[in-house]
């Protein structure tokens, strides 16, 4: 199964406060803020269940997702990176390097797995897609060739989650 969708998304926005200048546009290539987006697919199952809650409470909180046999999703993962454009390659990151990193850090670990039973991070933590998004961000934040921006996971056509690392303040 091909788990990658080969649709790189690249956007560039000029940062005027950095004195941008590029041929005929007044923009400097080194001062551009460029983001690269890449989509990946993986399938995994999970059961939403907390050992801190009774069975009745689990069913009340998680509904049908608390069923003891679990259920699965075909997730779409969107990884965003930013960085300077390398003058030699014209890229902020080589897609082959990114693909290999995501394959090793995420896809090999999660694809066609039971998150509760086969992923150590979820043996004690409820594998909600919110928690999955945070876990994937943590696994990808050390990509050596560019800065990790928000990670987004689409769980269903109606549900998606995004995480961009720790932020100051708490929105309760």
Image: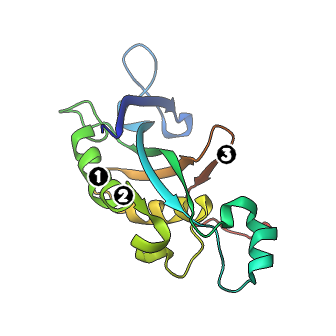
Furthest residue toward front:
69
The reply to whether residue 141 is visible in this rendering is no
Helix, strand or loop for disc 2? helix
How packed mark 2 is, by other alpha carbons closer than 10 Å (few <14, some 14-19, many 20 or more), is some
Q: Name the residue under label 3.
A: 159
Q: Residue furthest top?
A: 24
Task: Looking at the picture, tell me which residue is in the foreground, 56 or 131.
Answer: 56
Secondary structure of the residue carrying tag 1 is helix
Q: Write the residue at 49% across / 79% down.
A: 123
Counting residues from the N terminus, which is met first, the one under dot 3 or under dot 1?
1
Query: How many C-alpha atoms fall within 10 Å of the one at disc 1: few (<14), some, or many (≥20)?
Result: some
| Mark 3 / mark 2, whichever is N-terminal | 2
Q: Is residue 39 above or below residue 163?
A: above
Residue 106: image tag: 2
The residue under the point 53% across, 49% down is 73
User: Foreground: 101 or 126?
Assistant: 126
The picture places residue 86, in percent across and down from the top left corner, at: 25, 37
Q: Position of residue 44 (x, y in %)?
A: 46, 55
Marks 3/1: CA distance? 23 Å
Q: Is residue 152 above or below residue 129?
A: above
Look at the image and tell me in which quarter the C terminus lies.
bottom right
Residue 12, x across and y down, in percent: 47, 30
**Disc number at residue 103?**
1
Task: Say above or below: 151 vs 50.
Answer: above
- Judge by depth and name the residue closer to the eye, 61 or 97: 61
Whether tag 2 and tag 1 are in contact, CB under 8 A, the answer is yes
Q: How far apart are marks 2 and 1 (CA)?
A: 6 Å
Residue located 44% across and 66% down the image:
138
């Amino acid at each position: 199964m091909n788990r990658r969708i080969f649709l790189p998304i690249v956007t560039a926005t000029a940062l005027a406060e950095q004195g941008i200048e590029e041929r005929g546009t007044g923009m400097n290539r080194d001062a551009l803020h460029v983001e690269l987006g890449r989509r990946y697919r993986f399938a995994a199952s999970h059961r939403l269940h907390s050992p801190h809650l009774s069975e009745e409470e689990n069913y009340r909180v998680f509904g049908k997702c608390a069923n003891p046999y679990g259920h699965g999703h075909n997730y779409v993962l969107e990884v965003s990176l930013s960085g300077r454009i390398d003058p030699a390659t014209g890229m902020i990151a080589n897609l082959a390097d990114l693909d290999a990193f995501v394959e090793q850090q995420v896809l090999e670990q999660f694809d066609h797995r039971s998150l509760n039973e086969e992923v150590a991070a979820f043996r004690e933590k409820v594998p909600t897609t919110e928690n999955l998004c945070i876990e994937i961000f943590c696994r990808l934040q050390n990509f050596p060739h560019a800065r990790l921006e928000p990670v987004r996971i689409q769980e269903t056509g109606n549900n998606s989650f995004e995480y961009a690392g720790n932020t100051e303040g708490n929105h309760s």
